Image (cartoon, helix red, strand yellow):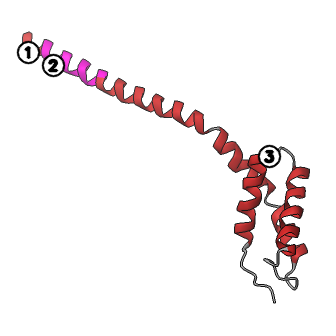
Amino acid sequence: MALTTLTSAELYQEIADLARDQGAATKDIWDELVEEVIESHLSLGEIDLDEDTEGLKETLRTKWDVYRRESAAEEDGADVEVVGSVDDEDEDEGDEKEELEGFGEQSDDEV
């Protein structure tokens, strides 16, 4: 009797890691990875033969869009750094406004 120890989330993560490592850029490649990973775990006895493997494969195939969004977000990670520095500039502008306000107050005192 095989133990069913792998969840669909764990299988998804394994497939996503492989896809990243291999540079999977199409749904066809994703689907091939799904097939290979499930078959590999079946042959190792890590997925029960009585489990609905076709349903599991179909569920994992539909995760292509999730993987694409995650990959795009990771690639845009460098852009997040740029946005962060823009926020820093906004803070500097606030400092300049305070200095200008202070400048105006000083000229009132002088008058």
Q: Position of residue 14 (x, y in %)?
A: 73, 61
Task: Name the foreground residue: 96 vs 52.
Answer: 52
The reply to whether the magenta stretch includes residue 101 is yes
Residue on which the image places disc 1: 109
The reply to whether the magenta stretch includes residue 52 is no
Task: Identify which residue is drawn at 78% across, 53% down.
Answer: 65
Furthest residue in direction left, as rendered = 110
Q: CA distance from mark 2 to mark 3?
A: 63 Å
Residue depth check, mark 1 versus mark 3: number of the one nearer the observer: 3
* Residues shaded magenta: 96-107
SS type, badge 3: helix
Q: Position of residue 49 (x, y in %)?
A: 88, 82
Q: Quadrant of residue 7?
A: bottom right
Task: Name the foreground residue: 12 vs 79.
Answer: 12
Residues at discs 2 and 3 in contact (Cβ within 8 Å): no
Residues at discs 1 and 2 in contact (Cβ within 8 Å): yes
40 left or right of 11 in image? right
